[in-house]
Structures are given as structure tokens and as C-alpha cells.
Image (spheres, rainbow, N blue to C red):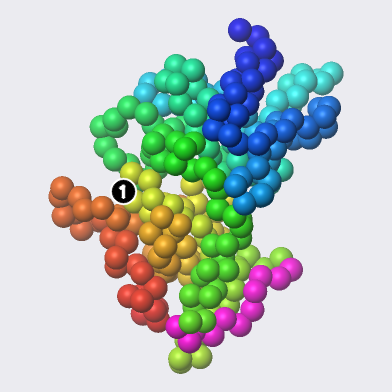
Amino acid sequence: MDPHRQGDLTEAIVIAELKRRDIPVSVPFGDNERYDLLAEDDSGGIWKLQVKTGRYRDGKVLFNGKSQHTNASGHTYQEYDGDVDYFVIHCDEVGGLYLVPESEVGSQMSLRVADATQDHRTINWADDYDFDERWPPEPATTGWRDAVIADLRERGIDVLGARGGDAPYDVVVRDADETLYRTSIRPGSVSGGRVRFDTGSTHAPGRDDVDLVLVRCRDTEETYLIERDAYDESISLRVEPTRNDDKRTHRAADYTLDRRWPPA
């Protein structure tokens, strides 16, 4: 099927699915907006949704995280970069409807439907993004950052400054010995039995730019502290027990703010 016709069909299916769930939905006039739909949650919050067609390949639902435009020089591609709040993905082959935050998607993303040979930390399980499990979204996109700052202050930890200018960190925190730590605050969620963060196109700054990473997990309602020089590109924290007691496993309980503050 022609890609544009397929896109129209997927959008019509998604609108029908939203209406079937009694979710108010509106379509913007014209083609000037980067989002496809506006949806309203029960509290009156408005969310910009981008509809994507999912394709089932090798046990995974694949979808693109970029928009495609055609001009005189051919096809051009552009990431959404905050212009939408969520992707809504419909995959006809598996009959699935998924809701994925834009911040977690790069140029492409896959959602694992079939069992994997190994439960690798980079796997995005489709069940964790099931639309009915994810809707309605959290009311404030920055709520996790405010929750971390409040968590720090409740423990008597000095928070010296919020992010400003071009600083790569979000806050600076100070311990009882007057040591200062440049700190990045990240949202996390549980997928495949692990707390995961930095799964999309944006990541915590590198080791030279920050000292600590604080992760607020919406599913466990816990704040985790990770020293930035403890990992390279990514790290995940195991919530559920494993069959084998592998010394390489990072247990979430060992990284709670209560256990890790102050840093060694």
C-alpha cells in the first residue's frame, strides 16, 4: 500500500480506538502542525500525539521516529525533538496499540512482542508500552524532576541551583563535608523487570560534565542514585529477582537514594 494511504488508514484506526475508549480527540486543521492528533485526558490535559504505523518483523514491532518530507532534492527526514508528546503506534499484524513518550524515541524504535533468547537491558517490551496501561499520561512532564528535588530537600540535602544557561547538569547538590556534585536528573520506568532510563534520543551528560545521575522511577516511586563514572553508555537496575545470582547484576535496591547518599 502507498505509504501516505497507509498513514491515513492508521490514523483513522487510532482515532476510532481513542473514541472507543471515550477519549476526546481533535484533528488540527491543515498540514502545518507536526502532530497528528490532540487528545484530552480525564483531568483536562491536552496531549499532542503523533500516529505511527508499526510493522511486525522478527518478533518486534518497528516504527520510525522521524517525519518524512519530499522536496526537489528528494526525501528529507526530521526528528520531532519535543514537537509532540507521545507516539501512538498501531500494528495491524499483532493488533496492538502502543503509547511511547517522544523523549524515549530516536530515529527508530522496536517493541519486543515475542520472547527473547536473553533478557537484555536494551529490550523495549511491547507490553510495557500497551496503550491502556500507559493512558492517561502523567499530568506533568517535569513532575519527576520536581519530585527528585523535593526528595533531596526532605532529606536535608542542599540543592544549590537549578539548571541555568548552557550548564549540562540540572542541579548542584552538597553533602555534609561541603563536597559539591554536578547532578543530572532523569526519568525512569520499569521494563522487563529493570529500571531503565536514557532509552531514547536524549541521555545524561558524560563523565566529564556530571558527577551523579538521579533517576526517578514512576513505577516504583523511588529515587535512585548512580555515580556517572560507574557506567559507559547505559545501565539498568534489576527490580525483580533473577534465576542466577550474577555479580554483574545491578540491583535497584542497592541504588536507592537512602542507600547511596552520600556518595562514597
Q: Residue at x 82, y 21 (%)?
A: 71
Total marks in image? 1
Q: Residue at x 60, y 29 (%)?
A: 19
Other residues around mark 1 within 10 Å, as few (<14) / some (14–19) / many (≥20)? some
Q: Relative to 17, is 7 on the left or the right?
A: right
Q: Residue 234 placed where, x, y %?
A: 43, 52
Type of amino acid at the residue the image marks with label 1:
Gly
Which residue is more in the foreground, 74 or 214? 214
Q: Any magenta on residue 174?
A: no
Residue at far left of view: 244
Q: Residue 102 placed where, x, y %?
A: 60, 43
Which residue is more in the foreground, 61 or 222? 222
Which residue is more in the foreground, 232 or 159? 159
Q: Relative to 250, is 46 on the left or the right?
A: right
Which residue is more in the foreground, 40 or 28? 40
Q: Relative to 129, is 38 on the left or the right?
A: right
Task: Decide if residue 71 is in sight here.
Answer: yes
Q: Residue at x 46, y 92 (%)?
A: 177
Judge whether 260 appears above or below 241 on screen.
Answer: below
Task: Decide if residue 180 is in sight here.
Answer: no
Judge whether 77 appears above or below 95 on screen.
Answer: below
Judge whether 167 appears above or below 127 on screen.
Answer: below
Question: Which residue in the protein does label 1 denote?
Answer: 193
Judge whether 109 appears above or below 242 on screen.
Answer: above
Residue at far top of view: 1
Element type at mark 1: loop
Q: Which residues are magenta?
A: 155-165
Q: Residue at x 61, y 57 (%)?
A: 140
Q: Quadrant of the N terminus?
A: top right
